[in-house]
Image (spheres, helix red, strand yellow):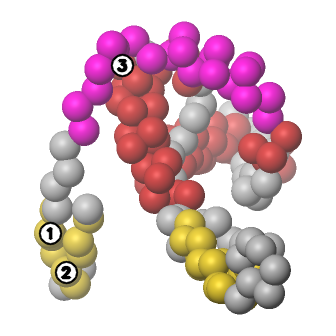
Amino acid sequence: LMNMSKGTVAKFKSRGSGYKAKTQPVTLKFGPINQRLKLTLRVLQCEAQRQPEAFGSSTYGFNDIFCRYKPFVRRWQADRVKAIQLGRGPADLEPPYAVCVDVSKAFDNVDVETLLGICSELLTAEKYTILKFTEIMTVMGNVKVNH
């Protein structure tokens, strides 16, 4: 078993060919899958900005979630205040709920042909240029580095 979200090294004993062959160790190195998919994620994020209607309510991390959640909660709070002003109780409005789901194994059962068909429709450019940079900023007195 290997955790592919981190770099992994697997070592095996291998017998050479022939009679009385010596056992030689074989080492396989696997880079982290998240690292290999990072550029693919950047391309999908680019397309999500170009054609947001095609990506629905997709989010790419906690910042995206917060940016969508905050306006939702503010609208809910405003509706709650209006309900109270109209003489209805605050219990008339259901509180907002959040559902968190771990989808880390979800792609184990995805039909690759179907996925490729969907992705090919989403990619609008023939070629993508990805630039790498480092951003250094201070956040509440601490230094934060984004790559």
Quadrant of the drawing holding the C terminus: bottom left
Pointer 3 or 1: first along the chain: 3
User: Which mark, by number, is residue 143?
Assistant: 2
Q: Residues within 10 Å of mark 2 (few under 14, many from 20)?
A: few
125 or 102, nearer to the observer: 125
Q: Position of residue 16 (x, y in %)?
A: 71, 76
Pointer 3 or 2: first along the chain: 3
Disc 3 to disc 2, C-alpha distance? 32 Å
Pointer 1 or 2: first along the chain: 1
Determine the residue positioned at 46% across, 58% down: 35
- The kind of residue tagged 2 is Val
Residue 114 within the segment the image draws in magenta: yes
Disc 3 to disc 1, C-alpha distance? 27 Å
First to last magenta residue range: 110-130
Q: Secondary structure at mark 3?
A: helix
- The kind of residue tagged 1 is Ile
Q: Position of residue 68 (x, y in %)?
A: 51, 42
